[in-house]
Image: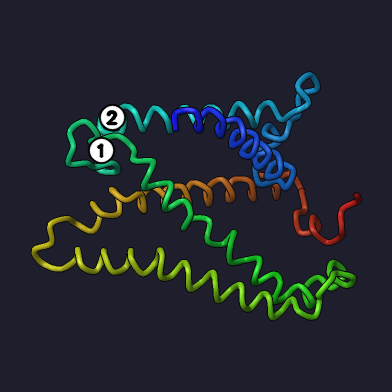
Amino acid sequence: MTLYPFLLCPVYINFLSRLGLAWSLDRQLPEWFGEVSERLRAPANAIGAALVVAAVFAALQNFPILKMIGLGALAPSADPLLDGKLNLVSTLWFSILAAALTWIMPGVNALLVRWTRPDLVRSAPFVTWLPWLGAVWIVFAVVLYWFAGINPIITNVSGLLQPGAEESALGYLNRTGVTFTLLIFAAGIVVWAIQWFRNRAAGVDTHLMYQQIPPD
């Protein structure tokens, strides 16, 4: 078990850095993240940013930094040794919920692509089956996310809002990582808004970005 993190970390760093590169090329992140090092032949800035973020999370997990800066309520624990330390295990579970659109949207795309982008699927195999496959996928993903994620959260929060509950609803959201996930969503929206204004000020028309199939 000790060996697995060391084997997986380089994979995740490469994955995250390539996401940063793609977002930069799509003008969703500053151009700095998309700069490729000629010596390394890799997006060195994006790799460095991924390492910095990983180091921050590791520090928040292993040291009560949140408690030191007055944000201990985001990482409460009955164990004094864990109080104020970020619980990445619970955050990992809710990060799967945060990826809901990643799993649901392929079904939506399969349902609509014959009308929204017929040029992309004109010669695709099983093209006539795409709407049916998309509908089945949407039902599967929505039902799974509802019963495995959304409904348990609603049920727990509703119970904790009743008089005499042992824990506050906010305490539950903080302890299980829901609050942290919402903060990550909020940070992403802020970055998107900043980039939207930057692109508009620079005259970058992102609406034309996906209007044709890119070259091979």
Q: How far across and how far down the image is residue 90, in percent? A: 36, 47
Nearer-the-camera pick, 190 or 35: 35
177 relative to 127, above or below: above
**Marks 1,2: beta carbons within 8 A:** yes
Q: Judge the density around disc 2: few (<14), some (14-19), many (≥20) Cα neighbours within 10 Å.
A: some
Q: Tag 2, which secondary structure?
A: loop
The disc, 1 or 2, on the residue closer to the chain's N-terminal end is: 2
For residue 72, the mark is 1
Q: How far across and how far down the image is residue 118, in percent? A: 84, 73
Q: Is residue 4 left or right of residue 81?
A: right
Q: Tag 1, which secondary structure?
A: helix
Q: CA distance from mark 1 to mark 2?
A: 8 Å
What's the residue type where badge 1 is placed? Gly
* Residue at 66% across, 38% down: 30
Q: How is the image coloured?
A: rainbow
What's the residue type where badge 2 is placed? Pro
* Residue at 58% across, 66% down: 104
Q: Is residue 159 left or right of residue 110?
A: left
For residue 152, the mark is none
Q: How far across and how far down the image is residue 44, in percent? A: 68, 26
Residue highlighted by disc 2: 64
Q: If the image is split into quadrants, where does the N terminus sit? A: top left
